[in-house]
Image: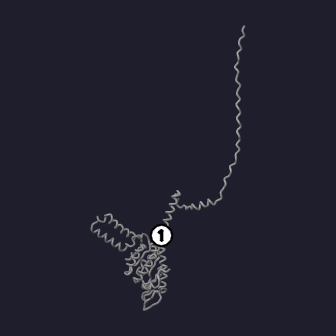
């Protein structure tokens, strides 16, 4: 089922393009007609492209990856910041820091500096500084918060970028292309769609159009996050059930690293199905009857010699 429809995009004003004299010929496949010197975008193609991009963003969110929202133009930055915060995604709504993707370790150092200042305020070290030093640290903290506050939780490079107005955010698109990071972007009739992986042909100047399309993407991301949460809860429940079974059976042994799990039930079934093997009968050993021992022959008693009496004379 489509996530949006033709009428809703029409009501949001997503069909208005730029002046015909400022158009980019590479956007010709997405232009429906020219009227009063303004190009009209084919919203039927916009609906299809939104569905493709929303499915991609949902899969990224389901796998636990981050999508960086980028919009620094006046009518879009507040909307984008609020929408990105609602789905717990990082965003850049002030000036794009040069090298934010290609020189990400340096950006992380600046974020860590901001975290260090917060720790100083918590442990009381900040209060021990001189008044002038405290003012300097506060100004530095405010500047870092303004430019990098929305990405302080982004510990690694994002898996995708969502960009509003690729002409204004040309540096962000170039860095993403250099690192092979997919780019999803709202592209107007005056822009070149070549460097964009998921082109959303729509009006990128009207706040209502930006809000409507961003809202569709945020709902898709939220669906992915909810599915991830359910899968995690299910896996935890199954693991807890397995542990309880092992504890009852008295076989809660630690498996060797890299060893394949053994299906106990399948092994028991194999043993039951195997034919019983009769044990070989022990051969009767003939026991020879012991012959009775011969009685010992008594030795004849020695007769004592009889002394003859002397004859009387």
Q: Quadrant of residue 117?
A: bottom left
Q: Is residue 306 left or right of residue 238?
A: right
Q: Quadrant of residue 19?
A: bottom left
Q: Residue at x 70, y 35 (%)?
A: 293
The residue beneath circle 1 is 230
Element type at marker 1?
A: helix
Residue 99 visible (yes or no):
no
The C terminus is located in which quarter?
top right
Q: Position of residue 159 (x, y in %)?
A: 46, 73
Dot 1 crowding, Cα within 10 Å, few <14, some 14–19, many 20+: few
Q: Position of residue 192 (x, y in %)?
A: 45, 83
Q: Position of residue 186 (x, y in %)?
A: 44, 81
Q: Position of residue 187 (x, y in %)?
A: 44, 82
The residue furthest left is 131
The residue furthest bottom is 36
Residue 75 visible (yes or no):
yes
Q: Is residue 167 above or below residue 156?
A: below
The residue furthest top is 313
Q: Nearer the viewer, residue 291 or 149?
A: 291
């Amino acid at each position: 089922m489509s996530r949006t429809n033709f009428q809703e995009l029409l009501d949001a004003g997503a069909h208005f393009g730029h002046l015909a004299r400022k158009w980019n010929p590479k956007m010709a496949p997405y232009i429906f007609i020219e009227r009063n010197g303004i190009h009209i975008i084919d919203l039927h193609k916009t609906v299809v492209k939104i569905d493709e991009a929303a499915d991609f963003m949902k899969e990224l969110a389901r796998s636990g990856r981050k999508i960086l929202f980028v919009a620094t133009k006046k009518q879009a930055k507040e909307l984008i910041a609020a929408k990105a915060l609602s789905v717990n995604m990082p965003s850049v709504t002030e000036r794009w820091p040069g090298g934010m993707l290609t020189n990400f370790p340096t950006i992380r150092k600046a974020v860590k500096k901001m975290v260090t200042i917060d720790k100083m305020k918590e442990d009381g070290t900040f209060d021990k500084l001189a008044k002038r030093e405290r003012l300097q640290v506060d100004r530095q903290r405010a500047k870092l918060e303004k430019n990098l506050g929305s990405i302080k939780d982004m510990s690694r490079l994002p898996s995708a970028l969502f960009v509003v107005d690729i002409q204004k955010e040309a540096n962000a698109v170039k860095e993403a292309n250099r690192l092979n990071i997919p780019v999803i972007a709202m592209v107007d009739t005056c822009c070149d769609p070549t460097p964009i992986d998921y082109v959303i042909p729509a009006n990128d100047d009207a706040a209502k159009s930006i809000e409507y399309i961003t809202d569709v993407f945020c709902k898709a991301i939220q669906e992915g996050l909810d599915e991830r949460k359910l899968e995690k809860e299910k896996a935890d429940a199954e693991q807890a059930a397995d542990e309880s079974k092992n504890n009852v059976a008295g076989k809660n042994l630690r498996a060797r690293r890299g060893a394949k799990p053994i299906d106990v039930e399948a092994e028991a079934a194999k043993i039951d199905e195997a034919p019983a093997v009769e044990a070989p009968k022990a051969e009767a050993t003939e026991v020879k009857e012991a012959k009775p021992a011969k009685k010992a022959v008594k030795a004849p008693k020695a007769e004592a010699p009889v002394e003859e009496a002397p004859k009387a004379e």
